[in-house]
Amino acid sequence: MKQKQGIRKNLDKKTSKNTIQNIAKYTGLSFQMLALVLLFVFGGKKLDEYLQLQMPIATLIMSLIGVALAIYVAIKDFISK
């Protein structure tokens, strides 16, 4: 009986360690994706101001590029691990 409890404790420790590592990994990934999107939106807004466009075309295009890059980074991270 004691041996089963020892095995369960070891499994619980490994499981909680993996859970913490996964939380840290995916939290970092989400911040990276957010930073990419915000950077491209900010760049698009500045480009719209510089070009003095009536419609925020650069913001729209740059934000879509930022989202596409963020998805690409996430997929690349999922595949590599």
Image: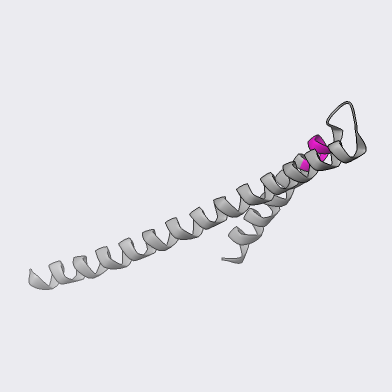
Q: Is residue 11 magenta?
A: no
Farthest-out residue, left: 1
Colour scheme employed for the rendering of this structure: one colour
Left or right: 56 as drawn, with respect to 73: right
Classify 66 as above or below 56.
below
Farthest-out residue, top: 54
Say how many tags the image has. 0
User: Residue at 85% across / 37% down in the picture?
Assistant: 49
Name the image quarter holding residue 23.
bottom left
User: Residue at 71% across / 48% down in the picture?
Assistant: 39
Q: Nearer the viewer, residue 30 or 5?
A: 30
Q: Nearer the viewer, residue 81 or 48?
A: 48
Left or right: 20 as drawn, with respect to 47: left
Left or right: 51 as drawn, with respect to 4: right
Provide residue 46's location: percent of width, then percent of height: 81, 42
Provide residue 20's location: percent of width, then percent of height: 38, 60
Q: Nearer the viewer, residue 35 or 54?
A: 54
Provide residue 81's location: percent of width, then percent of height: 56, 66
User: Residue at 56% across / 52% down in the picture?
Assistant: 31
User: Residue at 8% across / 71% down in the picture?
Assistant: 2
Provide residue 1's location: percent of width, then percent of height: 7, 68
Residues rendered magenta in the picture: 58-62
Q: Nearer the viewer, residue 34 or 69?
A: 34
Q: Main secondary structure of the magenta part?
A: helix
